[in-house]
Structure formats: structure tokens, C-alpha cells
Amino acid sequence: MKEISNKEIIRKITLENPWWEEQGGIDDYFKKFKPRAYLDSLYEVVTEKAVKRAIVLMGARRVGKTVLLYHIIQKLIDSGIDPKRICYISIEAPVYIGCSLEQIVSYYLEIYGFKDLGGCYVFFDEIQYLKGWEVHLKKLVDDFRDAKFVASGSAAAALKLKSAESGAGRFTDFHLPPLTFYEYLYLQNMTELVEKEGKIDNDINRVNEEFVNYLNFGGYPEAIFSEPIKKDPGRYIRSDIIDKVLLRDLPGLYGIQDIQELSRLFTMLAYNTGNEVSLDELSKGSSIVKNTIKKYLEYLEASFLIKILHRVDQSGKRFKKANFFKVYLTNPSMRCALFGPVTADDEFMGYMVETAVMSQFPVEPVYYARWHGGEVDVVILEEGKIEFALEIKWSNRFFDRPEELKSLIRFAKFHGLERVSATAIDKSGTRAISGVTISFTVGSIFCYRLGKMSTEYKISSVKRLIEEMKVTTASPTT
């Protein structure tokens, strides 16, 4: 039986790097995409020469990891880096089956007769398809101290776990999230719908229209730029994002035998995004034993498909047994893909807005509060003290009758909060009830502000990370 020849592997590597040709650059297909807001901050990490670490770019499928890598490559070329010193490898290509990262690098060195990788930037895309990738990547970092390695992958569960286990001091993780509502508008040059000279625009109806579009398909960069995908976003999101994770990635990573069982549970969770559930309810509804559900929840959360919100009581204390919790999709577009698009007056719109809000919170951990006779959608604790409380509504009713937000008011008074927050469809302002001020914000505008804050928070976190890495790099690890 014939084996894949070295010549074929070298040919594939050459084809994947068109910028090696004279006057070359990345493909026009990738150039047409406006870079995500994280490009400059990630570029700083990649080009920081004092830090001898590989960058591991993690995230769910189709959030734009590969396009971001190509934009970094173009930025390197534009900065004057010799294109031949930049190598991109898509590990999932069949031609690389059986190859280690060291072997692939040796083929790259052979192409140009390089003695080493000094000054080179090597990108490994979809690295999780290589068994034991973390060991090989760590060795490359140790062996080629003057090169920079960047790896990406969709199967975030394995990436995060293994980078933590085997990459201590050698890897830096960077999580690329789905689009926030802010970034959805930013990529389409539409932020002026919300902001004019730093002030909130009054065209709320237009903002809400785009917000509904965001809920339906706006979590994924490719979807917002492709007219065919916009016409049938459900098919794209189901086949390219959900199905590949459930049917291929997770079974391959964890040896899951009953794929239909996993799919059934995820479908149930997606339909109930934003609702409180329990292991007992999930087990009864899916016919899956509770211990297996616990594992599946862990896998789904680690793969950035769901986000679990834990419950606190009225006093803000966690329950010893987490019998009840809320599950949110990490992007509302996934629910629309499975069960159809929503409209502004859809009966599930409240849950969709709540899912959207939770998908772009910049801080962790976030909880919800529920006790006998009361519930608050979102609470934030700092050092055991309640600092923020929010009720998410897609209705103007409570703006007109704020006294009906009894649980929120009671919770605020219990914790001595003078001000709490709530959302509405198209009304904003403050209402004072029983000594508590409720700040109402239009739901879409709240999501925009939260998404912008989240993006800026992540960018500033990356800058702090660079400084921290410089400090730790000053003390060699063994």
C-alpha cells in the first residue's frame, strides 16, 4: 500500500502559503473580511519577542479563528517580515495524517534550506486533530526559542485542558468568543446606529431591527457577510457549527458512543435556553442517567456551546447542592438555527434577549438568585457581597409599572442596594420605588454597551497579560 510521499506534503505546505510567491499576500477571500476587534491586541502577543511562549487561540467553530490568523499573517507581511519566514499549516488536511509537528516543521525548513526557525512565525490551524499536540508544541517552543508558534483549534475542551496540563510556562491561551452585538455592528460599520458623537441615538426601532437580526444569525462573522447564509442561517449554523461539534468533535475527543443521546440533550438545552433546569428534569426529559448528563454538560460547556449559571439564595449564598441551575447557549443564533428565526414579538423573545445578555458579560462569575417566592435574573458578587442586580425583560410593562418588579426591589432592599437595573423594549430612564432606584435601559442598547465593555475588557486583559508574561519570562522556567 502506498504512503503519502514527502513530495506531496511539501507541495501541500507550499500551496497553503501563497505569500511565499513574489508580491504575495493572503488570499482575497480573507482580505474582504473586516478584522475582528481583537486583531491588534492579539498581534501584540504574537509579536512580543521577549515572551518565549506559543499562543493557543481557542474558540467555538466559525467564530473567525482562521480568518484572524490570516489577518495576523498579512499584518506581519505589511510590517516588513520576510513572507518566507511565515508558515501556515492546516493540521486537519488529510496529507498531514501521521505527521508530528516536528516533521512538518522539518519539511518547512527543507523547502528553503533554513538551518533553524530564527525569526520565523509558524501557525498551526485546527491543531486538536493531531494526537498529543500539546507535547509536540511544547517541544517546539523549547527547541526553537527564536521562533513564534501560534496554534488554533475548535475543540476547545481538549485545547484548554491539555494546554493547562502540559503547557505551563510555554503556552498562552486566548479565547475568541462569538460576536457580541457591539462587534456585530462594528464589523458592518453600523455603530453609528447606537452612537453619535458618544451619545446614544434615538432611532431605537432601527437598532432593535438589527438586534433581532443579530439574535437570528449575528454571532458568526461569515454569516453576516454572506447573503446566501443570511437567507438560510439555520442550515449553515446547524451543519457547520452544531452538528460538527456534536457528531464529530466531542465523540472523537471523549469517546462518546451514543451520539444521538448527546444530541438529544443539547436540543433540549437549546430549546430551554434561559430557563432554570435540574438534573432530575433533564434526566427525565432525555432518558439519560444523571451521571452521564453531568459529563455531557461539562463537555458542552468546555466546548463553548453552553454556559451554566449557578444559583444563589436571597442572601447571595451558593447552595451546597447545585440541584437547580440555568443553562444558556453561548450564542442565541444557535437556538434560531434549530427552531427557526424569531421576530420582535416572538413568545421566546424574552429568553433570547436574556441569552444574548449572558453571552456578552465581561466578568465572571455571574449568578442568578432564586428563593421561595422570588427570582432575579442576574447578580454579581464581589468578595461575597452583592454588587449588581439586573432583571432582563423584553417588555415596556415594568417601565410603566415598576412596582411589579417585586423580587428585584425586595432583593435590593435586603442587600442595601440603592440602585438596580432592568431592561425594556424601547424605553429608558429611572424609577424610584420604596427607596430603590431602578435604571431602565433599552434591551438592545444594554447588549450593545455590555458587548463593547466586554470587547474592551478583553483587549485590556490581553495587554495586561503581555506585561505579566514579560515578568514571568524574566525568570526562566524549568
Image (cartoon, rainbow, N blue to C red):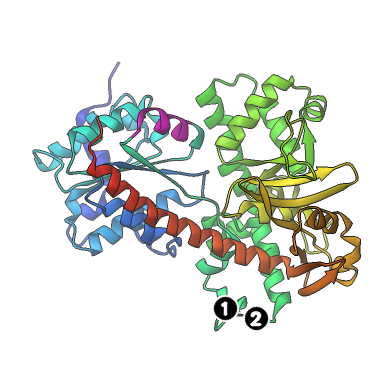
Q: Is residue 144 left or right of residue 423?
A: left
Q: Residue at x 69, y 35 (%)?
A: 266
Amino acid type assigned to the residue bearing label 1 in the image: Glu
Residue 188 sits above or below residue 7 on the image: below
Q: Is residue 435 left or right of residue 265?
A: right
Q: Residues within 10 Å of mark 1 (few under 14, many from 20)?
A: some
Q: State which region is magenta.
A: 158-168
- Magenta stretch: residue 159 in it? yes
Snapshot quadrant of residue 15: top left
Q: Residue at x 78, y 73 (%)?
A: 430
Quadrant position of the C terminus in the picture: top left
Where is residue 267 drawn, in percent x and y? 72, 37
Q: Camera-side residue: 248 or 71?
A: 71
Residue 42 sits above or below residue 448 on the image: above
- Magenta part mainly helix, strand or loop? helix
Snapshot quadrant of residue 219: bottom right
Q: Residue at x 72, y 31 (%)?
A: 265
Where is residue 343 drawn, in percent x and y? 78, 61
Where is residue 31 drawn, in percent x and y? 37, 62
Amino acid type assigned to the residue bearing label 2 in the image: Asp
Q: Which mark is residue 192?
A: 1
Which residue position holds label 2? 201
Nearer the N terminus, badge 2 or badge 1? Answer: 1
